[in-house]
Amino acid sequence: MTELMSQAYSFGEGRFIPPPQMRVLPRSPENPLEWAGLESHAALNIVDLANADSCAFLATADLGKVFENGSFEVLGRLEGSDLRGCSLLTV
């Protein structure tokens, strides 16, 4: 399991707002080398610059949406992936 130093908080309705040093980026669920569009169902990549002494760039198996203002929603896990950590809350 990889822990992030930064935390994103929700002010309701399941949408999370990351701090300035953290970005969530959408990637294609079918092709890990292809970016997905904003507000589409996508796999989530996370860049957390606060992870200075560990991996700052993560490709997750979480399924979600990323919005133009940088906020994001976690909708579940990619098909065929294991349930892990906080994703168990979406079951």
Image (cartoon, helix red, strand yellow):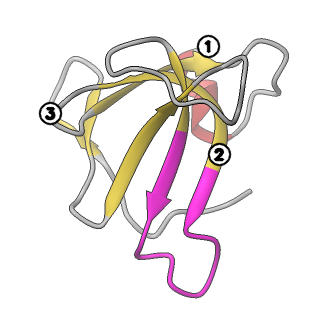
User: Quarter-wise, where is residue 55 in the image?
Assistant: bottom right
Q: Which residue is mark 1?
A: 91
Q: In terms of sequence position, does the residue under pointer 2 or pointer 3 come before the other?
A: 3
Seen at 65% across and 45% down, the residue is 59
Name above or below for residue 83 compared with residue 59.
above
Which kind of residue does numbered mark 2 sit on?
Ala
Q: Is residue 24 left or right of residue 35?
A: left
In x, y percent, where is residue 45?
54, 43
> What distance separates the C-alpha of mark 2 from that of mark 3?
25 Å
Q: Is residue 33 left or right of residue 13?
A: right
Q: Which residue is mark 2?
A: 59
Disc 3 secondary structure class: loop
Pick out the residue farthest to the front: 34
Q: Is residue 73 above or below residue 4?
A: above
Q: Mark 1: which secondary structure?
A: loop
Reply yes or no: does residue 48 show up in magenta.
yes
Mark closer to the chain start, 1 or 2: 2
Q: Would residue 13 be found to the left or right of residue 25 on screen?
A: left
